[in-house]
Amino acid sequence: MLAEFIQFLFSGITIGSIYALAALGFGIIYNASGVINFAQGEFIMLGGMSAVVLAAAGLPLPLAILLAVAVVAVVGLLLEKLAIEPARNADIVALIIITIGASLVLRGLVQVLFGKNTRALPAFSGDQALQLLGATILPQSLWVLGTTVVIVAALAWFFGRTRFGKGMLATSYNRLAAQLVGINTRLILLGAFGLSAVLGAVGGILITPITYTSYDAGIMLGLKGFVAATVGGLGSGVGAIVGGLLLGITEAMTAGYVSSAYKDAVAFVLILLVLFFMPRGLFGAKVSERV
Amino acid sequence: MRIKALGRLIGASLIGFATALAALGAWAAEPIRIGSVLSVTGPAAFLGEPEIKTLQLYIERINAQGGVIGRKLELVHYDDGSDAGKANAFTKRLIESDKVDLIVGGTTTGSTMAMVPLVEAARIPFISLAGAVVVVEPVKKWVFKTPHTDRMAAEKVFEDMKKRGFTKVALLSETSGFGQSGRKETLASAPKYGIQIVADETYGPKDTDVTAQLTKIRNTPGVQALFVFGFGQGPAIVTKNYGQLGMKLPMYQSHGVASEEYIKLSGPAANGVRLPAAAVVVADKLPKEDPQREVVVAYKKAYEERYKEPISTFGGHAYDGLMIAVDAIKRAGSTDKEKVRAAIEGTRNYMGTGGLVNMSPQDHMGLDLTAFRMLEIRNGDWVLVD
């Protein structure tokens, strides 16, 4: 019984930390611009896909990973420069629609350049599952979990301690006021896209050995990541993590104890409940307190 | 009076032109127009792409050898983007403005079923490349199909399970159309083989982890084997999780994963997995005396030489569809639609990539269980087990 429960828990934590990584990327751009970046799922896909293609071209894995992150960062910066910045005076909804367009373009480009097949990346520390209390977990899941924790800590430091990070937060609260006190909001927005592209890429690379990747992998990851971000409270780092894990664990427990057919339904009911009683998400309120 | 005369003059010259044009057409031996609506882009692209490539390749080859009954073949192709609504609109265009002689296509069951009412009304022979039983059951006068059905896959698997003495089986199916149709057929045909489905779980086509479902299945009392029904990356993730959990339950997959990609993605966990597949997957491994060897090896060679990518069963379905159509036109000696339809229905002993085809007025697919080979994956490669 206990072993069963722990297995479901591991399953939930693995899926959940993937959702959490996706949710974090949504939060950063939202903080800097108030925009929900619907191309976030594509950043994740592009990270995994670039690493696979570079590794398949014969590069050693660590180098392929670094290059893949760089590629996606450049894509994120270009997206901001070429699509978002020219329309920066448009309202939020227009910007959101632009990101949807960007996601379609990225998906199409990958489909044409790298094909429609599902691709795999070797696991960083082998495929031998670890045994714990009668349940098993893949070493790669630990990589995902560990990196997620490191990223959250780094982001907390970035937003709380650095000038650029604080500038980003200030811009999100009031762009005009931020400009008046001398913050370069253009640079902030560019930085936010670069940062969340890097975050997406790291997430995508970490999860590809577990989930595989294909040109359309970003759709589902983006959707679930957005849901996790909303549950946790948009823009909150802790919220993204908790939202992601909560979503993942609920899914796994439902699949295990109720029926896999209701897995997604129960997750969505949970979201409705959270949003009904806490419209800003679980941790959304804390963000407004900081103002 | 003068206006009337002028009218008569114009009328006469129009008739003259028309006659001249008709004569010219006959002299140039009008091509046989083969219409096709395939899902070359969109989610079903991995099916549609090899299909269109196969059609293009073989129509080119047939034309290079002088065509059929002295006429060239001409392919009129539309891509429905895996959208059944578009398939319907393009079929209308094929019938009304392109005036095709027959249609080969309809990649997915959804697209095919959207095309069926149109071809039935227009009375045009239609060979579908879609999998589900519903395409040919109940029999529709003008509709035929080449791929194996999910019911056949389930029956082939049950046959093998029975041989190994398994009677209590867990089913794990995908929530996609393919998986759910497969689930329905599996549940329906299990009692015929004395097999009891003791667990009936599902997973989403984009799910990234199914260890919860597998744990539940492993803990089901009395379970002897696992049958997974899905295609694409889902079954590979199932297989990987199965390895992660160290499960020893014999695993069966459906014909949906009969590709090198599945083995590559699943890694060592796929060893020991059994699945029903068309002979085309193991073309090189068929024994010399196998009656199907010649056709699948020739297809494999032609396709791989041209496109530098591995063949799939799906392209093979398009090959069979085209060859059955060409053969029927030859036997009919014309493109008269009723004669061609009757000739397709009269197809006997046609050995294709999918298996031996014997059509009849009651059976518009013409394949039986021998069309599937039971394969096992050993050391990352296919092995024939029967």
Image: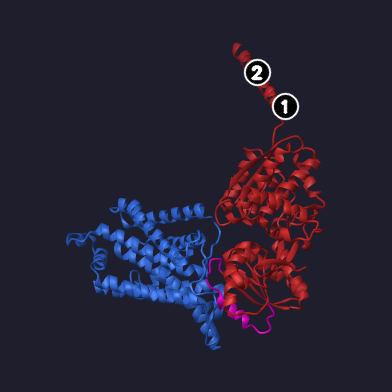
Q: Which image quadrant: the C terminus of chain A?
A: bottom left
Q: Look at chain A in the picture and name its colour.
A: blue
- Which of the 4 image quadrants contains residue A33? bottom left
Q: Which image quadrant: the N terminus of chain A?
A: bottom right
- Which element type, helix, strand or loop, lies under badge 2? helix
Q: What's drawn in magenta, residue-wise? A: B204-225
Residue A58 in the image: above or below residue B248: above
Q: Is residue B218 magenta?
A: yes
Q: Residue at x 31, y 55 (%)?
A: A91
Return the x and y of residue B42 as percentages of the image width and height: 55, 54
Return the x and y of residue B130 as percentages of the image width and height: 67, 55
Q: What residue does disc 1 label? A: B27
Q: Residues within 10 Å of mark 1 (few under 14, many from 20)?
A: few
Residue A48 visible in the shown view: yes
Q: What residue does disc 2 label? A: B13
- Which element type, helix, strand or loop, lies under badge 1? helix
View extreme (left): residue: A181
Q: Amino acid at mark 2?
A: Ser
- Which of the 4 image quadrants contains residue A79? bottom left
Q: Who comes first in sequence, dot 1 or dot 2? A: 2
Q: Look at chain B in the picture and name its colour.
A: red
Q: Which subunit holds the residue at mark 1?
A: B
Q: Which mark is residue B193?
A: none
Q: Residue at x 45, y 66 (%)?
A: A204
Left or right placement of residue B373 versus residue B43 in this view: right
Give the camera-side residue of B120 and B263. Answer: B263
Return the x and y of residue A4 as percentages of the image width and height: 55, 84
Q: Residues within 10 Å of mark 2 (few under 14, many from 20)?
A: few
Residue A270 visible in the shown view: no
Q: Is residue B251 magenta?
A: no
| Total count of labels | 2
Q: Residue at x 77, y 53 (%)?
A: B294
